[in-house]
Amino acid sequence: DIQMTQSPSSLSASVGDRVTITCRASQDIRNALGWYQQKPGKAPQRLIHAASRLQTGVPSRFSGSGSGTEFTLTISSLQPEDFATYYCLQHNSYPWTFGQGTKVEIK
Amino acid sequence: EVQVAESGGGLVQPGGSLRLSCAASGFTVSSNYMSWVRQAPGKGLEWVSVLYSYGNTYYADSVKGRFTISRDNSKNTLYLQMNSLRTEDTGVYYCARVGILLGDPNGMDVWGQGTTVTVSS
């Protein structure tokens, strides 16, 4: 199985900060990676697909990069509505696997 | 509007069975890949199963042999039959549509609000 190691597990940031979250795959997954945002008590929502493509309707302050084994989600200027938990998901091979999540909290 | 809505969750004893349903609107289940994802209380997301439009199915090792994914085309509904339930199956179960990019699955793009399954004596 492919292991997805996500870091950090949590971070504290202020509104306006630039935030970076990383996912590392245990083997090459090409660009078969998505990023998801989940708020408490709500379903996840996809932000990024195919590693770097912005989901329709998602603000442009979100961006994704990487391929192979190293991937990054960047929020260029953190907004109040961005405080949530973020997950990466690899769908290159079965079983699909999520990272353990990054909780973004208010500093 | 494209959306999915889960139902069928509840309280069940260990060893029991439950069938979850996922009704889709705005798109055709049989023409899409569909998936189930779950989340144990206070934990992260765990992929459970996927059903391809042409019938192939895949499962997480933790549910293989116990859970079955299927669909009813006439009802435009996806199902998850869960047998031999264990306490560790407790959580919120999400139904999701899987996007396709250049012929390959491209992750989950439409999610339901989830249905809660509690396995306890």
Image (cartoon, coloured by chain):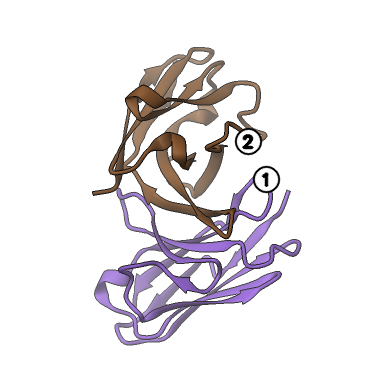
Q: Colour of chain A?
A: purple
Q: Nearer the viewer, residue B32 or A85?
A: B32
Image location of residue B87, percent across then percent down: 51, 25
Mark 1 residue type:
Tyr
Residue B58, labelled with which disc? 2
Instruction: Judge whether B56 appears above or below A46 on screen.
Output: above
Q: Quadrant of residue A65?
A: bottom right
Residue found at x 29% / y 44%: B3
Secondary element at image label 2: strand
Image location of residue B101, percent across then percent down: 54, 59
Residue B40 visible in image: no
Instruction: Judge whether A61 appears above or below A51 on screen.
Output: below
Q: Nearer the viewer, residue A79 or B67?
A: B67
Looking at the rendering, in which quadrant would you find the C terminus of chain B? top left
Residue under label 1: A94
Residue A68 visible in image: yes
